[in-house]
Image (spheres, rainbow, N blue to C red):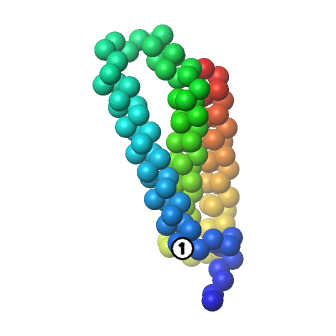
């Protein structure tokens, strides 16, 4: 068995499952939003605010945000591992994208729970 320090104990199968699970969550969330728009005749600020004020929508939105960030992190890691060969540059870019994704998570949490 060959260990790769960049994988942090993960395997390709683990990444494969996470990518597929996050894609399913994102597809379901998309259908949820499309269903809202299809069943709502007039989308006003009050209707939109009420929709996102519901606890189910908030939880589903946070779950979709986390799924999106997991999906993005694995994708960025794979692209950087494949195309950026200098370890220092790859590590710096991975750090940058990790911090950026954490900022997106914080902004998403503040936005969703601020409604």
Q: Residue at x 62, y 48 (%)?
A: 101
Q: Specify the farthest residue to the front.
A: 56
Q: Quadrant of residue 86?
A: bottom right
How many numbered callouts?
1
Percent across and percent down for residue 110 are: 66, 29
Instruction: Establish if 71 lies above or below 106.
Output: below
At 37% from the left and 37% from the top, the residue drawn is: 31
Q: Looking at this view, is 18 or 95 the one in front?
A: 18
- Quarter of the picture containing the N terminus is bottom right
- Residue 22, placed above or below residue 58: below
Residue 84 visible to the viewer? no
Seen in the image, is 61 located left or right of residue 106?
left
* Residue at the image position 54 percent from the left and 35 percent from the top: 61
Residue 22 percent coordinates (x, y):
50, 52
**Image position, residue 78 (x, y; %):** 52, 67
User: Dot 1, how many residues are within 10 Å of its Cα: few (below 14), some (14-19), or many (20+)?
Assistant: few
- Please tell me whether mark 1 sits on a helix, a strand or a loop: helix
Instruction: Compare residues 14 and 45 and report the one nearer the observer.
Output: 14
In the rendered image, the vertical position of residue 57 relative to residue 106, given as above or below: above
Q: Position of residue 41 (x, y in %)?
A: 31, 14
> Image point 38% across, 15% down: which residue?
43
Residue labelled with disc 1: 12
């Amino acid at each position: 068995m060959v260990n790769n320090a960049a994988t942090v104990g993960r395997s390709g199968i683990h990444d494969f499952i996470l990518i597929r699970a996050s894609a399913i969550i994102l597809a379901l969330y998309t259908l949820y939003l499309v269903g809202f728009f299809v069943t709502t005749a007039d989308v006003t600020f009050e209707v939109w605010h009420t929709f996102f004020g519901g606890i189910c929508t908030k939880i589903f939105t946070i779950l979709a945000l986390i799924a999106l960030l997991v999906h993005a992190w694995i994708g960025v890691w794979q692209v950087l591992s494949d195309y950026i060969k200098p370890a220092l540059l790859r590590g710096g870019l991975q750090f940058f994208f990790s911090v950026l994704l954490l900022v997106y998570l914080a902004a998403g949490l503040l936005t969703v729970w601020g409604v």
